[in-house]
């Protein structure tokens, strides 16, 4: 019937996602429209139907800062966030305007206030294709000074714990790189409590500090 259904993709993990206290996922695509078309690699443009499937699977928070954030340029950022809002999914990592980019996502679970932040190492060179004045707020890039400031603002906003989602590392490498370790140490020193990584597409080692 010319409709997309992404529900079956999540069937075998749904019980684990839905039964968790807080489930986060990295949306490594933009949400497009039939008029603008859909596409896979290297410029990801996905049907809106993915988002209700993500919600139905039990995800609570969607991070949008990754190397495909600007695949559909400014429209992709804005439309993706509009659709996430439409289906009631919380999000962080990209923004429609400067004011929104200053917001700290706060989520309460079992009496614990969680501040959630997200950043990416880059956007595949697509940053050159958007208005440079808007680039500063469209996507959160990995910049130490900014991240330190955001962690501090999250704490001041009342966060009991701070989760930082980092889109970093080398694709298909099961080894954590020196730069990841350096950034992790910097983030923990700044006040982060949990760091969740994405981008390599494989499971890397994890460590408790």
Image (spheres, rainbow, N blue to C red):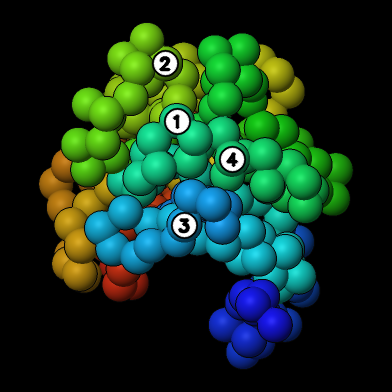
Give the mark nearer the N terminus: 4 vs 2.
4
Mark found first going from the N terminus, 3 or 1:
3
Disc 3/disc 1 C-alpha distance (Å): 15 Å
Q: Nearer the viewer, mark 3 or mark 1?
A: 3
Dot 3 falls on a residue whose secondary structure is loop
Residue tagged 3 = 37
Tell me the mark number nearer the camera, choosing from 3 and 2. Answer: 3
- Residue 200's place in the image compared with 115, above or below, is below
Whether tag 3 and tag 1 are in contact, CB under 8 A, the answer is no
Residue 141 image offset from top left, x and y in percent: 34, 29
The residue at 73%/23% (across/down) is: 158
Query: What is the x, y in percent for residue 35?
Result: 54, 52
User: Which residue carries the number 2 mark?
Assistant: 134
Q: Is residue 160 visible?
A: no
Among all residues in the image, which is located at the extreme front? 35
Q: Left or right: where does residue 31 sit relative to residue 119?
A: right
Pointers 1 and 2 in contact (C-beta within 8 Å) = yes
Residue 74's tag is 1
Distance of label 3 from label 2 (alpha carbons): 24 Å
Q: Nearer the viewer, residue 188 or 13?
A: 13
Q: Is residue 52 above or below residue 184?
A: below
- Quarter of the image with the N terminus is bottom right
Q: Is residue 173 positioned above or below 65 on the image?
A: below
N-terminal label among 1 and 2: 1
* Image mark for residue 79: 4
- Of marks 4 and 3, which one's residue comes earlier in the chain? 3
Disc 4 or disc 3, which is closer to the eye?
Answer: 3
Residue 102: give x, y in percent of width and height: 58, 16
Q: What residue is drawn where x is 67% and y is 39%?
A: 82
Q: What is the total number of numbered labels drawn onto the structure image? A: 4
- Give the class, few, some or many, for how many residues have Cα within 10 Å of label 2's Cα (few <14, many ≥20): some
Marks 4 and 1 sit apart, C-alpha to C-alpha, by 9 Å
């Amino acid at each position: 019937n010319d409709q997309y259904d992404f529900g079956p993709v999540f069937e075998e993990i749904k019980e684990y996602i839905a039964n968790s206290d807080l489930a986060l996922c990295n949306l490594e695509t933009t949400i497009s429209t039939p008029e603008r078309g859909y596409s896979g690699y290297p410029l990801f443009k996905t049907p809106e139907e993915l988002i209700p499937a993500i919600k139905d699977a039990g995800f609570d928070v969607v991070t949008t800062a990754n190397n495909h954030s600007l695949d559909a340029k400014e429209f992709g950022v804005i439309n993706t966030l509009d659709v996430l809002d439409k289906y009631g999914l919380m999000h962080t990592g990209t923004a429609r305007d400067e004011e929104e980019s200053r917001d700290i996502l706060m989520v309460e679970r079992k009496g614990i206030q969680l501040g959630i932040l997200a950043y990416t190492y880059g956007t595949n060179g697509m940053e050159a294709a958007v208005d440079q004045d808007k680039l500063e707020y469209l996507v959160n890039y990995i910049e130490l000074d900014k991240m330190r400031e955001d962690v501090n603002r999250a704490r001041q906003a009342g966060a009991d714990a701070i989760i930082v989602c980092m889109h970093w590392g080398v694709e298909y490498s099961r080894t954590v790189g020196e730069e990841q370790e350096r950034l992790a140490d910097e983030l923990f020193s700044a006040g982060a409590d949990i760091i969740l990584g994405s981008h390599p597409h494989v499971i890397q080692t994890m460590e408790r500090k």
